[in-house]
Image: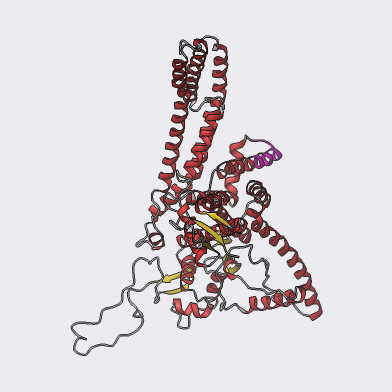
Amino acid sequence: GGAGGGGGGGDDMAWKRSVGRSAGGTGRKDYEDAARLYGLCRRMTASESRGSRSEGGANDGTARSSSSSSSSALDRLRLAFGEYGRLRGSAIVRQGLQTRPSSPETAAAPPSPPNNNNNNNNKEMEKRVVPDLLALKSHLYSLLNAAFRSEASFGAMVRSVLEDVLNGGCASNSSISNDDDGGGDDGGRRIAELLAKHVDARFKDAKASAAGTVAGGGPGPEAAATTTTADANESFQNEILALFRHVHSKDVFEAFYKRDLAKRLLTGRSVSTDMERSFLSKLKAECGAGYTSKMEGMFKDMELSRDIMGSYAAYSAGAAAQGGGPPVGKTVDMDVQVLTTGYWPVYPKYPNIILPPELLALRTKFETYYDDKYQGRRIAWQYSLGNCIVKASFPKSVAPKELIVNVCQSLVLLCFRQEDGEDGRGLTLDEIGKRTGIEDRAELERVLQSLSMGRDGTRVLKKVDYDSPTEPHSSPTKAPAESKTAPPPKVKRKQRVRRNVGPHDRFLFNSSFSSNQRRIRITNITMKETTEERTKTHASVSKDRLYFIDAAVVRIMKARKMIDHRGLIGEVMAQLKFPATSADIKKRIESLIEREYMERVEEDRSRYKYLA
C-alpha cells in the first residue's frame, strides 16, 4: 500500500467524499472500509503493473509472475464479494422457505390438528423473502457504486450472485418433472411464485400504496401527494423488474401472476387499473408480446363487458317499456362479465346449481339478449367467481346488513331465508347440498366454514356439533333389563366447535349476530390460495414445459432433417426460456421417437432423422 500510495491521494480523497454521500448514515463505516480495501487492491495492481513494465525483457518471467499475483488481489476481492452476497441471499431464502413441505403428498395432506400459529408464522416468513431480496439487491448495488467505483467486473459479479440466489444456486436444475410443489432446489420456481404473490399483494392493497407515498416524501399539497404515489408505484415496479430479469422460471411467474390478475379484475380488488396496465407494458417490453397476450386479452374482455352491459341496460329498459309493467327482477340488479375462453384460467363449474327465481329470470333474459345480438356464440356460466350482495336482517341490528358473498355462499344463505329447516333444528350438509345443487362436497364444506367459523363479525350462521351420528332429540329404544340399572348413554354436545364439517352437524341462522359495519365482506376460503391449488399450478407449468420441449425438438429436426444427439441437445437448450437438463430433453426425445416424429439412424445410433 505504501509503495503505490504516491500520485493518487487526491483522487482517493475525492472518492472517500463520494462514498460518504452515497452511503448516507446507515452502515457508512462499512462502505468506507470496503472502499479503502478496494483502493488498496487497486493500488497494488497498478504498482505491480508499473513494476513489470519497467523491469524489461531480462526479468520477463519474473514480471509476469509478479503481475499474476498482484492482479489476483482484485480478483480475490471480487470473489469474496460474490461469496458474501451468495451467503446472505441463501440465508434469506433458507430462512423464508425452510418450513415448507418437501413433497406434493406431504403438501396435499391436511394438518391434523391445524396449528394456526405455525401456519401464520410460516406465511409471514414467506412474505418477507421478496422484500429481503430487494433489500439485498439494493445493498449489493450500493456497495458496487459507492465502494467499488461501478467497476464492470464487480457489476458482473452482482448479476451472477442474484441469478444464483434467485434460481436455487444452479441454473441447470431440473424443474420439469420433479418438485411440482415448488419446494427445494427447483430452479427458482418458488422464488418466481413468491415474486408474483408480492406484486399481487401490492396491487390489491391500497394501504401498501399509501405507505409508499408516506415513505416517498413529506406532507404537502394533494397534487404533490398524487405525484409521490405515482413515483412510488413506478419505483416499486422497477425494483420488481430488476429481480424478475434474473429469474429463469419466468413461466412460473406468468402462471401465478395471470391467475392473481384474473381474481383482481373479476372481484374488483385492484387498486389502480393504470398501475396494472403500466406493469403489464413493462413485462411486455421485457419478455415480448407473446408473454402478455392473454393478460392483455383480460383487460379487453373487461372493457367489452362494460360496453355489453351498457347495451343490455338500454335493451332491458326498452323491453320493460314495451311490456307495460315493471322490469324482470325489479328488486335485483345483475352485472355480467363476458369472458373469452382461453384468456382466463380454468375455474370449477357447477352445472346443476339451483338458482333462486330472481336470478334465474335475469339469467334467462340476458341469454335471450345475447343470443339475439351475437348469433352463433355460446354462453357457459362460471358461478365460482360470481359475487352477490345479500341484504339480511338480524334481531340485534336496527338496520339490515349488506353481506358481500360469492354465488355459492348466497345460495346457502337463502336456505335460511324463512326457517331453520322443516323441524326448526337446522340443516345438515346433505340437506343444504340438495337445496343449492352444489355437488362438490369439499366446496360446500368450505362455504359453510366461511359463514359459520370465519373471523369475528362474519359468522352469520351458527354451527352445532354432535359427538355421534345419533340425533340429540331422538329417543333411543330402552332395553327392559337395563332401563333401571344402566340408562342409555346420552349424546353430549361438544363444548368447543370443531373446525371441520361433519355429515350430522347442523347449521342455523345466527340470531345473535351483531356488527357495527353496514356492509360486511365474507371471504370464502377458496378465494385464498390453497396448497392443492398451488400444486396444480406448478404441475400445469411442468406440463406446458414438456410441450415447449417437444415443439423445439420437432422444429429443429424439421429444419435439419438429420442431427447428432449432442448437437440436438445444445440447440434445444439454446431455444428454451426456462431451466432444463439434458436428461429432461432426452426423455422428450424418446417420447417423440415412440410417437414416430423422429427415429435413430441405423448406421449411427447417436444420430436422429426426422420423419415427415
Task: Report how many numbered discs are placed on residues in the image.
Answer: 0
Q: Residue at x 52, y 40 (%)?
A: 134
Q: Judge left or right: residue 104 versus residue 51.
A: left
Is residue 347 placed above or below 361 in the rendered structure? Answer: above
Q: Quadrant of the C terminus?
A: bottom right
Judging depth in this view, the residue of 116 and 299 nearest the camera is 299
Please name the residue shown 52% across and 80% down the image.
435
Compare residues 149 and 224 and report the one nearer the observer.
149
Coloring applied to the structure: secondary structure
Residue 384 vs 251, above or below: the answer is: below
**What residue is rendered at 45% in x and 24% in y?**
72
Q: Which residues are magenta?
A: 219-231
- Based on the picture, tell me whether residue 44 belongs to the magenta stretch: no
Q: Residue reaching furthest front?
A: 603
Q: Tell me if residue 455 can be seen.
A: no
How far across and down, in percent of the image, does residue 95 sit? 40, 44
Residue 352 picture location, percent across and down: 56, 79
Q: Quadrant of residue 492?
A: bottom left
Picture coordinates of residue 603 (x, y %)?
A: 49, 59
Vertical order, 406 against 49 (above or below): below
* Residue 396 or residue 152, whichever sits in front: 152
Is residue 26 shown to the viewer in this render? yes
- Give the image location of residue 213, x and y in percent: 62, 40
Looking at this view, is 285 or 553 the one in front? 553
Q: Main secondary structure of the magenta part?
A: helix
Q: Is residue 372 above or below residue 57?
A: below
> Is 149 on the left-hand or right-hand side of 76?
right
Answer whether residue 230 is magenta in the image. yes
In the image, what residue occupies the spot 45% across and 30% down? 79
